[in-house]
Image (spheres, helix red, strand yellow):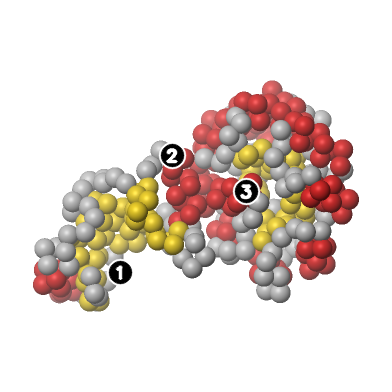
């Protein structure tokens, strides 16, 4: 996968923004970064788009700024000259796609049917925008199309929001979702960038979907672990599940056969994607214990501890 698209897949959400006045570009970029989304798709639907991209790219070079609603090769030139690092289009224009491919400019053209996928493949692309996502059948349609095209990945946009974001991103062929719910134009115009930062943070939290899974309690030996789980069953009727390294009481309590990580034990936190959680938590200043990371057969992280204790407990992520 192209490095830019790979970075977008870790970010998970691509804010689609419409800027009417270029003066709003830099504070909006800061709001996105502060909220946890270091990327933006600035649509070429306004005259301020080119200047807005240039301002964002100059102020925050670490940010992945792209251009959306790109319809012509001239707009590609304008966007790239301004500092855009990727191009997004609502449909698939073969001339625009070829122009970008020949110049190694990442482009994600819009399609909503198998014919569009075939066109994209014939032009050398394996990642496409699915647009408009919800009116075109949503995640069910993407899954149906992905079946015969095993190498193709999707970036759905159009009708994606906090209520269905997790449904889309739960399908591994979807690398990221485009959306504008966290950057309402009225808030941009009003200069409510603190409010946008809050909405962005909320969007990231919805995507990562952190939830408590279980509490792991360190015990001196297996007998103590088994006894702890058995007592929980006597008191609360939690069924026991004796395993090789621990005994569970229900699904919420794990009694360890020996002292594991954490002074008192560990707490397991579910997330929709350990890879995205590592990316975003690292951006929040959280250190990850690299030696604890477990990978699946595709090399994707599925388990990791954060490198600190809170209240005497270690914390690990699991999906």
* Element assignment for label 3: helix
Of the numbered discs in the image, which one, if any, rests on residue 45?
none
Frontmost of labels 3 and 2 is 3
* Element assignment for label 2: loop
Within-10-Å neighbours for mark 1: few <14, some 14–19, many 20+:
few
Distance from the alpha carbon under mark 3 to that under mark 1: 39 Å
Residue 61 higher or lower than 162, as above or below: above
Distance from the alpha carbon under mark 1 to that under mark 2: 30 Å
Frontmost of labels 3 and 1 is 3
Residue 114 higher or lower than 190, as above or below: below
Q: Residue at x 44, y 43 (%)?
A: 282
Residue 94, horizontal then vertical, whole percent: 87, 54
Q: Mark 3 points at which residue?
A: 3
Query: Could one spot residue 182 in this view of the protein?
Result: yes
Task: Find out whether the residues at labels 3 and 2 contact each other: C-beta distance under 8 Å.
Answer: no
Mark 3 or 2, nearer chain start: 3
Within-10-Å neighbours for mark 3: few <14, some 14–19, many 20+:
few
Of the numbered discs in the image, which one, if any, rests on residue 284?
2
């Amino acid at each position: 996968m192209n490095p830019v698209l790979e970075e977008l897949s870790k970010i998970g959400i691509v804010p689609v923004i419409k800027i009417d006045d270029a003066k709003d570009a830099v504070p909006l970029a800061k709001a996105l970064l502060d909220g946890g989304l270091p990327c933006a798709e600035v649509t070429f639907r306004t005259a301020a788009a080119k200047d807005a991209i240039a301002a964002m790219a100059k102020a925050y070079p670490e940010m992945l700024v792209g251009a959306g609603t790109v319809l012509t090769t001239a707009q590609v030139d304008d966007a790239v000259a301004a500092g855009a690092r990727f191009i997004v289009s609502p449909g698939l224009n073969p001339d625009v796609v070829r122009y970008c491919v020949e110049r190694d400019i990442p482009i994600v053209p819009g399609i909503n049917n198998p014919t569009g996928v075939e066109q994209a493949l014939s032009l050398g692309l394996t990642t496409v925008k699915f647009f408009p996502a919800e009116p075109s059948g949503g995640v069910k349609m993407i899954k149906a199309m992905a079946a015969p095209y095993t190498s193709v990945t999707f970036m759905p946009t159009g009708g994606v929001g906090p209520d269905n974001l997790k449904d889309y991103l739960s399908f591994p062929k979807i690398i990221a979702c485009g959306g504008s719910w966290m950057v309402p134009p009225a808030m941009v115009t009003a200069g409510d960038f603190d409010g946008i930062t809050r909405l962005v943070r909320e969007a990231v939290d919805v995507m990562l979907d952190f939830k408590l899974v279980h509490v792991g309690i360190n015990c001196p030996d297996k007998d103590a672990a088994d006894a702890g789980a058995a007592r929980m069953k006597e008191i609360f009727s939690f069924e026991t599940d004796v395993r090789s390294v621990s005994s569970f009481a229900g699904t919420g309590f794990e009694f360890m056969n020996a002292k594991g990580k954490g002074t008192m034990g560990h707490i397991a936190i579910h997330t929709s994607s350990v890879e995205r959680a590592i990316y975003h938590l690292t951006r929040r200043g959280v250190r990850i214990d690299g030696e604890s990371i477990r990978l699946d057969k595709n090399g994707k992280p599925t388990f990791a501890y954060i490198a600190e204790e809170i209240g005497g407990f270690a914390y690990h992520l699991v999906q």
